[in-house]
Amino acid sequence: MPALIVIPARLKATRLPDKPLAMIGDQPMIVHVWRRAVAANAGPVVVACGDQAIADVITKAGGTAVMTDPDLPSGSDRVHAAAESYDPSATFDVVVNVQGDLPTLEPKLVAASVTPLARPEIDIATVVAKIILPEELTDIAVVKAAMSLNPGETIGPTLYFSRNLIPSGPGDHYHHIGIYAFRREALRRFVALKPTVLELRERLEQLRAIENGMRMAAALVDTIPLGVDTPADLDRARRLLGVA
């Protein structure tokens, strides 16, 4: 299934200013993410840049940068804008949104995110991993997916997402990883929708799709990349990548 990989990035961040340009070893974080997305061999990779400084480091590294309006409200809007600019004839049926703050991303997760779209009824696909660490169950920074997954299956519908522990009762719980594979028309529809009640309440953009009847599914993977949101996360990323 032909896919275009888009990494949205902008410098405005409250907890970690200029986050995409934060150095990890001798490379900015956004370059680490770009290299890992390229290594997935899932399709061409472009960085949707809200700022010229980001475009400059990506171009210097040999990547493709697409400038987007810095006032776009979300990463999904930036991904859509970049996809329309880079591929106006919609050659690519699938657009994958890879967050620009995942410097430890394993390339296989990018390819895995597309696999649920083999089911024609699915509009948007993503990835999850089983929660192993007890502290993640109550950590509101860890988004949980309520996922219908039968024994032996690795792909199933995702029915809701929350920062609280869902669902109740005995069984596995799943950590949502912020990578999304959109069918092209689903992405166009999604960005045209207004923010919804549950999206605003949970502060989770993917709920907009569910509230509007779009169908989501996830692939189960065995690794969780570190998302960098704070200086402490950045230090941890440096240690994990051996450049502390």
Image (spheres, rainbow, N blue to C red):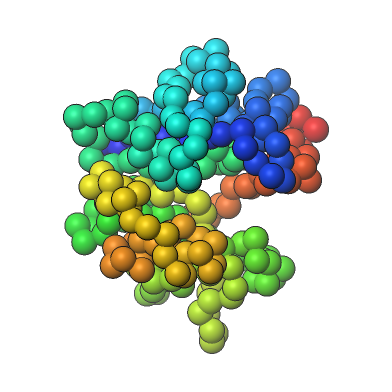
Residue at image x 36%, y 27%? 44
Front in this rendered view, residue 139 or 115: 139
Residue at image x 50%, y 60%? 204
- Determine the image quadrant of residue 195: bottom left
Front in this rendered view, residue 197 or 32: 197
Answer left or right for 94 relative to 199.
left
Q: With respect to residue 91, does 167 lie above or below? A: below
Report whether residue 211 is seen.
yes
Q: With respect to residue 217, does 182 lie above or below? A: above
Is the N terminus in the top left, top right, bottom left or bottom right quadrant? top left
Answer left or right for 162 relative to 1.
right
Could you tell me residue 164's position as x and y percent? 60, 73
Could you tell me residue 136's position as x and y percent? 67, 66
Answer left or right for 168 relative to 214.
right
Could you tell me residue 161's position as x and y percent? 48, 68
- Determine the image quadrant of residue 103: top right
Could you tell me residue 138's position as x and y percent? 68, 72
Report whether residue 108 is seen.
no
Is the C terminus in the top left, top right, bottom left or bottom right quadrant? top right
Residue at image x 43%, y 20%? 64
Total residue callouts:
0
Answer left or right for 53 relative to 160.
right
